[in-house]
Image: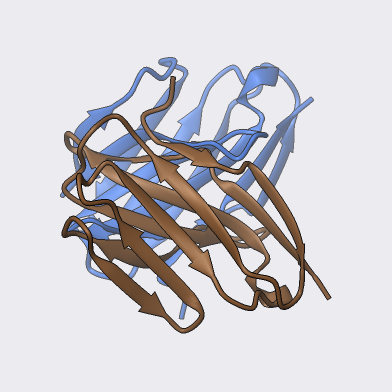
Amino acid sequence: DTAVSQTPKYLVTQMGNDKSIKCEQNLGHDTMYWYKQDSKKFLKIMFSYNNKELIINETVPNRFSPKSPDKAHLNLHINSLELGDSAVYFCASSQGEKLFFGSGTQLSVL
Amino acid sequence: TQLLEQSPQFLSIQEGENLTVYCNSSSVFSSLQWYRQEPGEGPVLLVTVVTGGEVKKLKRLTFQFGDARKDSSLHITAAQPGDTGLYLCAGSYGNKLVFGAGTILRVKS
């Protein structure tokens, strides 16, 4: 059974659209994250939630809005998509310092 | 400027060769982690090093944490095609885990 699952795997959309990525973890972890991996493979944290509360909010455009309905879910909604938003987005969870990642959502904005 | 610098960025070697990748910083870390990421998948944790000078082995992979806890290395002995992937080091900085830019390793058979 997948520990951290995110959907969809691929997302191709037009500039200006709004889209969401969903993430669920069945590990019982308290903390969840969204990371963005650019074309050069650099992985950068965007947000972190602990027990549904936002604890890390990096310098991310406010077009990106995370939502955690419960501690097992952390979704990412993106408004008014731009070309520069194209990247792979990873959800992760942790208990302590060890991160467990989902398999990523490749977002392509045309 | 990145907090963690990894080198080399790319490495293409033949099966059976040895290699070392490096992770360096000017900052001291309480611990460093190494992850491997395969195409189309998320990073998977390989090891965490905590004590300065610590050496950990995972089959053909040897991880070392620098004495000053500012750097780490990953040595692979007799590389195999299955070792191909992106190797990322990561360290705790404040309340978040920051990653190096990674080393892309390709092992040719």
Looking at the image, residue B88 sits to the left or right of residue B4; the answer is: right
Q: Nearer the viewer, residue B89 or A79?
A: B89
Q: Who's the residue at 76% across and 75% down the image?
A: B15
Tell me where residue A41 appears, x and y as whole percent: 60, 40
Q: Where does the C terminus of chain A fall, quadrant-wise?
A: top right
Q: Is residue B7 above or below residue A2?
A: above
Q: Work out whether residue B6 can be spotted.
A: yes
Q: Who's the residue at 17% across and 34% down the image?
A: B94
Q: Who's the residue at 63% across and 35% down the image?
A: A87
Looking at the image, residue B6 sits to the left or right of residue A58; the answer is: right
Tell me where residue B98 appears, x and y as whole percent: 35, 38
Looking at the image, residue A87 sits to the left or right of residue B42; the answer is: right
Total of numbered circles in the picture?
0
Q: Nearer the viewer, residue A9 or B46?
A: B46
Q: Work out whether residue A102 can be spotted.
A: no
Q: Nearer the viewer, residue B88 or A102?
A: B88
Write down which chain is painted blue: A
Write down which chain is painted brown: B
